[in-house]
Amino acid sequence: MIAKADIARVKNLARKEVRVREGLFVAEGMKLVSELIASSLTATVYALPEAAAKLPPCNVVQIVTAKEMERISHLKTPSDVLALVQIPAYPAAAPARDTLSLMLDGVQDPGNLGTIIRLADWFGIGDIFCSSATVDCFNPKVVQATMGAIVRVRVHYGDLAVWLDAACRDRLPVYGTFLEGKNVYTENLSTECVILLGSEGHGISPGAAARVTEKLVIPPYPADTQRGESLNVAIAAAIICAEFRRFPARVF
């Protein structure tokens, strides 16, 4: 039986300030939790009896009833397994000269951020740099959307201006997506750079835009056909990352 205090503790992890204080986040679902168990970051796993038997070897599994799982779950439809996972600690970082990094300026939708983290994992991008206005990457909805990539991609929060200025000092190209940019499909793209993506409603902020060295656009097809105002930021990230990964060598 799970104690009332533990039920309250799990539910309260929906709030960012509690996650920061406890150093924990919540993950739910067999596939996601199984991946997190392999990372050795899981602190406690709550599982229904039949689900516990299917989990990878783990010393921190507590069996719960379906009713108890319903009480602790952060999902509308509770899963059969839930884990409390330690928030990984990363050293202070800045965009590196020899890598491709993503930078997010105020992305607010948890599903979009989770998808972008998953994309970064797929395309071998190890670091994402986020403005303080970007949604917390350990928000339960973000975690679910990452499908385990949350423990393989390092997500940093801080001042974009500081990071962008450092990139410019290091002569690291900063690419940004704009309606008036150059066609991403026809440009020679550097594999050592920063890719800056803006928020869903406002795009890239003026301060960050002023530090962009290369403006890109994903053109509609055909170009002269009326289309929606813009692409979803996660879809744009997928297209942009795929285009950059077409270039195996450094190009300036």
Image (cartoon, helix red, strand yellow):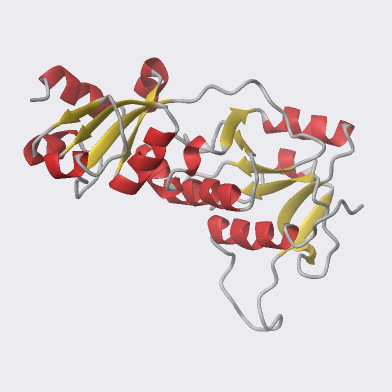
Q: Which residue is farthest front?
A: 57
Q: Residue at x 69, y 67 (%)?
A: 218
Q: Is residue 178 left or right of residue 3?
A: right
Looking at the picture, tell me which residue is in the foreground, 246 or 10. Answer: 246
Location of the N terminus by quadrant is: top left
Rendered image quadrant of residue 51: top left
Q: Where residue 212 sits in the image (x, y, percent)?
A: 79, 46
**Residue extending farthest right:** 252
61 is higher (above) or lower (below) than 134 = above
* Residue found 61% across the figure and 80% down from its top: 226
Looking at the picture, does residue 232 appear above or below residue 42? below
128, 108: nearer the viewer? 128
**Image side of residue 250 versus residue 222, left or right:** right
Nearer to the camera, 204 or 99: 99
Instruction: Give the percent coordinates (x, y) of residue 174.
Output: 79, 45
x, y percent for residue 36? 40, 36
Between residue 105 and residue 201, name the one nearer to us. 105
Say which residue appears at 80% left-offset and 59% top-offset: 247
Q: Is residue 100 visible?
A: yes
Question: Do we see residue 14 in this rendering?
Answer: no
Give the total of numbered labels.
0
Is 22 on the left-hand or right-hand side of 117? left
Q: Where is residue 56 shown, x and y percent of the image?
A: 32, 38
Image quarter of residue 183: bottom right
Q: Is residue 208 above or below residue 244?
A: above
